[in-house]
Amino acid sequence: MELAFERRGTGAPLILIHGIGHHWQAWLPVMDRLAASHTVIAIDLPGFGVSPGLPEGIPYTAESLADAVESFCERLGVREPHVAGNSLGGYIALELASRGVLRSATALSPAGFWSRAELLYAQAVLRTLKAGSRFGATPLLSGASAGLLVAHPSRLAPQALSAAAQALSGASGFDETLESFAGLMPPAPPKSPITIAWGEHDRLLLRRQAVRAARWSGQRVKLLKGCGHVPMSDEPELVARVILESSAIS
């Protein structure tokens, strides 16, 4: 699978996977910190960012996107990498951990641990953001609305907001992936070491979902103080530390 990606640093490989409607640049606030000890590869999922869509006939689901990431790693000759993901990317990281094909997984506010009402709420918010993204970095993607995704909207640079709006607007895989969430269940038990962390102020996937994630994983979920749903933009040093600690214990 051909995917757009950015590679930095040297050391054990670490794959970074963004959330639905985002792109690899979501990881820019933490990439250099992680690249000090890892070969960091931040990817655009199929149908997101500037990556081509999935081949015709393959549905957009979290599992098929995980297949694409696994295929991408094989093509690059990357075996048993560390993987960190946010939201949809967090679910994909856990799915790959359940397959036992990686050394460790770090999932930041992963999808899939919602109630029915919480899922419908998240889908409604994401559809609204997608509808407004065609207007660029408007107030819909800043201020109060950006506060649905990050705890500190003022820390988002205007250029980053504009690029994120463009990525969301052009995400050909968005609608089908979002619809597939209706059937998304937590993956099978992990075969690789995992760490789950949740934004203290996550307003998209509410932090009570962390309790379900903890029950599923059989361990406590780390709370990311001062962070929203996309924590890399809120507290990059904290997020980088969680990922590095997770990769160090595997």
Image (cartoon, rainbow, N blue to C red):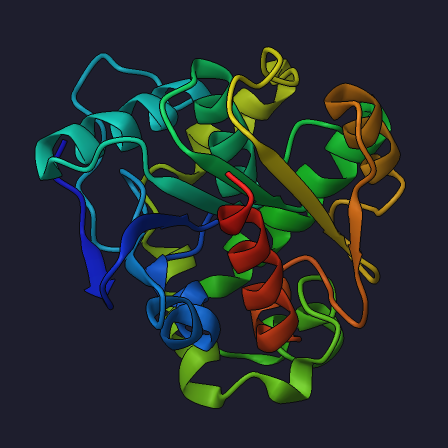
Pick whichever, 205 or 98, lies toward us: 98
Occupied quadrant, residue 23: bottom left
Residue 127 locus on image (x, y percent): 59, 46
Pick whichever, 247 or 54, lies toward us: 247
**Residue displayed at 48% across by 88% down:** 158
Residue 130 locus on image (x, y percent): 51, 53
Residue 184 locus on image (x, y percent): 61, 18
**Residue displayed at 52% across by 21% down:** 180
Pick whichever, 11 or 144, lies toward us: 11
Q: Would you say residue 156 is visible in this rendering?
A: yes
Q: Is residue 118 above or below residue 35?
A: above
Quadrant (top left/top right/bottom left/bottom right) for the N terminus: top left
Judge left or right: residue 63 versus residue 105: left
Identify the residue at the far front of this view. 249
Q: Would you say residue 136 is visible in this rendering?
A: no
Occupied quadrant, residue 123: top right
Judge left or right: residue 118 versus residue 194: right
Q: Is residue 215 above or below residue 243?
A: above
**Residue displayed at 40% across by 86% down:** 159
Judge left or right: residue 167 versus residue 193: left
Judge left or right: residue 10 versus residue 166: left
